[in-house]
Image (spheres, rainbow, N blue to C red):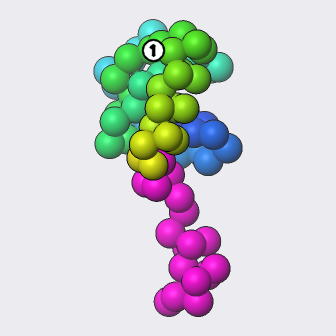
Amino acid sequence: MGKANFGGIVKQVCLEYTPEAKVDDYVLVHVGFALSTIDEAEAARTYELLKEMSQLQELEVPEIREAMSGGP
């Protein structure tokens, strides 16, 4: 297991499929699993595309969102 930083949000990810990954490497993550290592340019392109498509919601921390909306 390791920690991945998604634009400032840090999440635990499984590194079993990417044993070559090292600190400061970029990895492609899906449902908590790092699937491959990628270079910095590809990481930036992927992040921007996901941002444009509004596909970064899963990175939000529910407790913070609920507290801001007055939820439970």
**Quadrant in which the N terminus appears:** top left
The one of 7 and 53 positioned closer to us in this rendering: 53
Mark 1 is on which residue type?
Thr
Whether residue 3 sits left or right of residue 57 in the image: it is right
Q: Quadrant of residue 35?
A: top left
| Residue drawn where x is 57% and y is 39% of the image | 6
Residue labelled with disc 1:
37
Q: Position of residue 17 (x, y in %)?
A: 32, 21
Whole-percent x and y of residue 48? 54, 32
Of 45 and 30, nearer the camera is 45
Seen as rendered, the residue at the extreme front is 52
49 within the magenta span: no
* 16 over 67 or under it: above or below: above
Please determine whether, in this image, residue 13 is positioned above or below residue 25. below
Residue ID at (53%, 58%): 60
Relative to 53, does residue 58 appear above or below in the rendering?
below
Label the magenta part by its dominant secondary structure.
helix
User: Looking at the picture, does residue 50 appear above or below residue 39?
Assistant: below
The residue segment tinted magenta is 56-72
